[in-house]
Amino acid sequence: MVAGPDPDAPGPLIGRGRAADVYDVGGGRVLRRYRTDQPCEFEFAVMRALRAAGYPVPEVFEVSGPDLVMERLEGRTMLDVLGSAPWRAGSLARQLADLHVRLGEVRVERGRSWPRRFAGADEPLCVAHLDLHPDNVMVTDAGPVVFDWSNATLAPAGTDVAMTWVLMSTSEVDVPRWIRPVAGFVRARFLAEFLAAAGGLPDRALVHRIVEHRLTDPNVLPAEATRLRELSARMAANGPIGADSSG
């Protein structure tokens, strides 16, 4: 038997992610609701601060516990665009790198209790998204917009660049087996262009911390965990890590 519509839903369900559902509530707005009781107040404050600083994030309107009301973005994710137009890998990679660079330049009020990740005691910190990859960027007529700020934190410069490189280098490519060599070529080109435009990877110690952090994520697939362990072993042995720019 197919379940009927949820009588408690605030509107039509238009999207479903790993941890949240998105509903159309009319007026050019959507409501994103976590399936747990995870509060959104900090994410709401982060997005308001970033928007006030001129960084491209969705406008947010209301927050209540696990519910966050924001503007509805019209467009396609950068990952969708890359999949349908792989010849645009270079230009899309440079767009993503620009978003990373711009985020690293944002200065926001830090009186609130920001979480801190991957940082030593005296390292200078900047705002980090921690999931700034093509599937969290919406390509709109007005330009790219970054969403899903649930993991926002303060972290050393270059953390987001390293995280994105680790994610994209070790993630599973969800395409038919016969097309994987082509997808691998496109991904390699994208990452090379991305790193070149973003200034390269940060120091190996930070990259290694991020690899070890990814290995603790329960959502990592077995094949991805194998690649992460191989990368961790190469780094521990001071071996090459592919697109390493730090030597």
Image (spheres, rainbow, N blue to C red):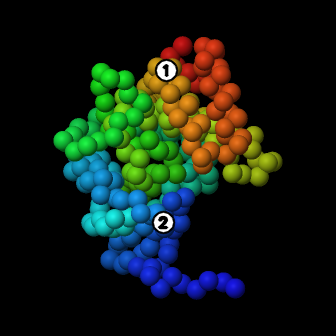
Where residue 40 sits: x, y (%)? Answer: 34, 59
Residue farthest front in this picture: 37
Nearer to the camera, 125 or 165: 125
* Residue plotted at (27% across, 67% down): 62
Q: Is residue 245 left or right of residue 39?
A: right
Q: Is residue 123 left or right of residue 200?
A: left
* Residue plotted at (30% across, 53% down): 42
Where residue 30 sits: x, y (%)? Answer: 39, 70
Q: Which residue was labeled with disc 2?
A: 35
Please, what secondary structure does the residue beneath circle 2 have?
A: loop
Nearer to the camera, 117 or 241: 117
Picture quarter with the C terminus: top right
Nearer to the camera, 52 or 143: 52
Residue farthest right in this picture: 178
Q: Which residue was labeled with disc 1?
A: 205
* Residue plotted at (31% across, 67% down): 64
* Residues packed near mark 1 inside 10 Å, few (<14), some (14 to 19) or many (20 plus): few
Q: CA distance from mark 1 to mark 2?
A: 35 Å
Q: Amino acid at mark 2?
A: Arg
